[in-house]
Image (cartoon, rainbow, N blue to C red):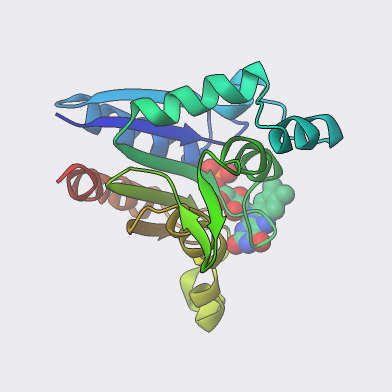
Amino acid sequence: MSKVLIIYCHPNPKSFNHAVYGRLESELKKSHEVRTRDLYALKFNPVLDGQDLGELQAGKVSADIAAEQAEILWADRLAFVYPLWWFGRPALLKGYIDRVLSYGFAFEYGPNGGRGLLHHKKALVLMTTGTPEVILGTAQNALPTSMRDGTLKFCGIQEVLWKSFDGVIAVSDADRHAMLDEIPALAKTLVS
Ligand SMILES: Cc1cc2nc3c(=O)[nH]c(=O)nc-3n(C[C@H](O)[C@H](O)[C@H](O)COP(=O)(O)O)c2cc1C
């Protein structure tokens, strides 16, 4: 049995993105322990300010960061569900990463540069986009870079599964259901 932490970041509980999250959670819960951090529902403060930086540099973390780090330490798998906003992550998710995946917790620097400290065996990223795959073209090759490579792999998670559900605004309901039906196999790979 795996322990999976889902970090979910979309403001609308009626969105397709929420349906993606819901399907992933219900699938995993059939045989695994699952916890969710719903960043909008939590009203998580995403601003890494001067006080935070000063505390982090002094080796301290504020209570809200410590609570999120404890959730991450509880899990052996991480999953992220969010929409593509301005070719990147929503600001709330970016700010969560800025504050929670802090120096000394998620990574450190040594003579050879950054060294990841996260112990998780695997991570899964499920993203929705407004632009169809055919229009994204080669630009889609750049999409995983900041989250998969610059964040999760940098922090030590070697295996990062990545799935983008593209053009979800314009596709038919049947297409959307077919996308949701891809989630059980992705969940299975995450926990295998
Ligand atoms: C602020 C904002 C920025 C967005 N930026 C992009 C973008 O850069 N590329 C893209 O394909 N879609 C973009 N979209 C569309 C969202 O990705 C799309 O609405 C979402 O993935 C659809 O899922 P939902 O219906 O569950 O929200 C943006 C939407 C918003 C609200």
Residue 48 visible here: no
Side of 31 where 118 appears, left or right: right
Locate residue 175, reporting x and y percent.
Answer: 35, 55
* Nearer to me, 18 or 1: 1
The residue drawn where x is 53% and y is 36% is: 15
* Nearer to me, 161 or 168: 161
Q: Quadrant of residue 73?
A: top left
User: Is 160 located above or below residue 34 in the figure?
Assistant: below
* Nearer to me, 30 or 168: 30
Locate residue 13, reporting x and y percent.
Answer: 54, 27
User: Is 146 located above or below residue 106 in the figure?
Assistant: below
The residue drawn where x is 35% and y is 57% is: 160
Side of 28 where 10 appears, left or right: right
Residue 151 visible here: yes
The quadrant in which the N terminus is found is: top left
The residue drawn where x is 27% and y is 27% is: 26
User: Is 134 located above or below residue 175 in the figure?
Assistant: below
Which residue is situated farthest in the bottom direction here? 138
Locate residue 9, reporting x and y percent.
Answer: 56, 36
The residue drawn where x is 54% and y is 51% is: 108
Which residue is situated farthest in the right direction here? 50
* Nearer to me, 191 or 52: 52
Which residue is situated farthest in the front direction here? 111
Locate residue 120, reporting x and y percent.
Answer: 32, 43
Please count the marks in the image. Answer: 0
Q: Quadrant of residue 93?
A: top right
